[in-house]
Image (cartoon, rainbow, N blue to C red):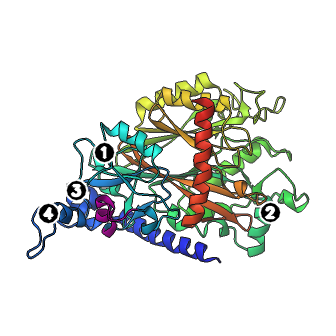
Amino acid sequence: MSSNQTDGLRQLQAMTDTLQRTRTNRRNLIRGGAAATASALGAGPLTTEAAPGTDTPASRLVLAQGLAPGAALVSSLRLPMRGIGSSQTGPLLLGDIANWYEVGCPIPLPVTVLAVDGKVPEGSSPAEMLADYNALVERLNETPGGLAMLPVEMIDSRVNTLDIDGLNPHLASGTETEPVVKVGVAGDIIFGRNGGNYQRKYGDYAFPMYQVKDFLSTFDVTVCNFECFVSETIEPPEIDNPNTLDFLTRPESLEGMAMAGIDAVTMANNHAVFSYSGYGLPGMRDTMRYLNEAGITPFGVGESLEEARAPWTIDINGTSIAFYGVDGVTANLDYPDSIGVQFMGDSPVAATASGGGTNPLMMDQNLADIERLAGEYDIVLPYFHMGEQYIWSPVQWVVDVSRQCIDAGATAVLSAHPHATMGMEFYNGKPIFYSIGNFVYDQMFSVETRQGYFLDMTFRGSKLVSFKTHGVEIMDFVQPRFMSGREQAAFMDRFWRSTDLTRLKFG
C-alpha cells in the first residue's frame, strides 16, 4: 500500500470516528444550539479584551480563539479540502496563512479572504467585499482559493462548508422544526462476473463493503443504484461466459450492503428485468424479495405501474424524504431512439397498469409525480438511470429531463448508468448530479470506470445546506476504497472539467 493510500485511510478513519460520535450526539448538539456548536468546534468564549501584559490587538485575539458561535468557514466548491483544524481558522482569516498548501491542501492555492458586506470578521482585512451572498457564491466559483466566514444559517450547498476538527458545522444548526439530516448516495452497485469470481475466491460475499461500511453507516439515510439479479439457485453466468452482460449474485452480498447501512436501492435500471438469459420478471421478483428480507427496500420497480411509480419514503426526526426511481435506459418511452437508450421493443421492461417492470421515463407522468411529491414531502430526490455511457458530459435530452425535474419541485436530481463520472450544475439554485459513477463494478479497464464517488448531502429541514463528494476507487474488481487527499484532488479536477464542459455546451 502506498503512503498516499495509507494517509488517505488514516484521514478517512479519523473522519469516520468523528462522524460516528457526532451521529450519536447530534440531538444534544441540536438542543444545545450555538453554544454547543462553539464547544464542539473548540472555539473559546469571544472577548474584546487583550490578555494582560500583551500588545495583541483585541480583534486579532478574537479571531485567534476560533470561530464565533453560529459561524462557519466557507470556501469554493473547487477547493480540494473538506476541512481544517480549529487552530488554523484565525491564521487563515487574518492572512497569517497565505497558501492552502500550508494547511494540507494537496495542491498549492493562494488564500483569498472574501467577505459579504456587513459580515466582516473583526480583525480581518478581506481582499474583496461582496454585496451579498449570491455575489460571494459567484466569486468563490471563480476563486478556488477563496475563503469567507458567514453565519451558518446563511449558507447553502453552492459553497463548501469546511469541517472544523472533522466536525460539520451544520450538524449543530438544526432545530426541532428544522432538524439536520445526513443523506448518502452511491452510484452503480453491480455484483457478479469478475466481481463474483473474487467474492468466491475470498469466500466472503460481504468483502466488497469492508473498506466503506463504517463511513456509510454514519448517515441517516443511504441509497444506491442496484443492478444485479439475486438468486440462491441459478448458476452464476460468468462460470460459462466470463464476458457475460448478465449480472447475478447470492443473497449473502445483500448482507454486506445491509452491514454498510444501505437502506434502499433504486432498481429502475437496465438490469432489473431485462437479461440475455431471460431472468425477466421472475428474476425481478426474487431480487425484490431477497432485498426486503435483508432490510433493504427496492423502489422504481413493481408488479404494476402504480407500484413502480411509488417512491421510497422515510421520516428522519420530522423531515420527510421521498426517493423516486426512473428507468431511462430499458424503459425510456420518450427518447427510445437516443444514444444511451436500450429500447427493448418486443421484450417490454416498463411496468404497465396490469404488468410488472420498471418505472418508465415518461416525462409527463414523471413530472406529475415529482410535482405531487414536492407538495407532500420536505425533500424529493429523483434518481434516474440514463445517459450515454463512457463519456465526460451529459447529452442534451438528459439535461432537459434533469432541469424539468427541478422546475417540477425536485430538491436535487441524481443519475447513474454512464459508468463514468460526470460533473454537476446548479439549475435555479438546485444541484443536478449527472453521473455518480461506479461504486461496485468489475470495470477495471480504465481510470474513469474504476472511479466514482459517494455523495454526502446535509439537509437542514428541506434545505440542502452542504454536499461533499468522496471519491472511491474499485480494487480487486469488486471492492471500493476511499481516495487519499491527492487522489481526490486529481479526481475532482476531472469532475470540475466536466462541469465546465456542461456549462459551455448547455449554458
Q: Magenta residues, as a range? A: 87-98
Distance in Å between CA atoms under marks 4 and 1: 36 Å
Q: Is residue 4 above or below residue 122?
A: below
Q: Is residue 155 above or below residue 122?
A: above
In primary-sequence order, the first of circles 1 and 2 is: 1
Q: Secondary structure at mark 3?
A: helix
Q: Amino acid at mark 2?
A: Asn
Q: Amino acid at mark 1?
A: Glu
Q: Nearest to the eye among marks 4 and 2: give it.
A: 4
Q: Is residue 314 visible?
A: no
Q: Are marks 2 and 3 in contact (CB under 8 Å)?
A: no
Q: Secondary structure at mark 2?
A: helix
Q: Amino acid at mark 4?
A: Ala
User: Residue at image x 20%, y 67%?
Assistant: 44
88 inside magenta stretch: yes
Q: Which residue is mark 1?
A: 178
Tell me if mark 1 has few (under 14), some (14-19) or many (20+) residues whose alpha carbon lies within 10 angstroms of its own. some
Q: Position of residue 3 (x, y in %)?
A: 60, 77
Q: Are marks 4 and 1 in contact (CB under 8 Å)?
A: no
**Near-viewer residue (133 or 478):** 133
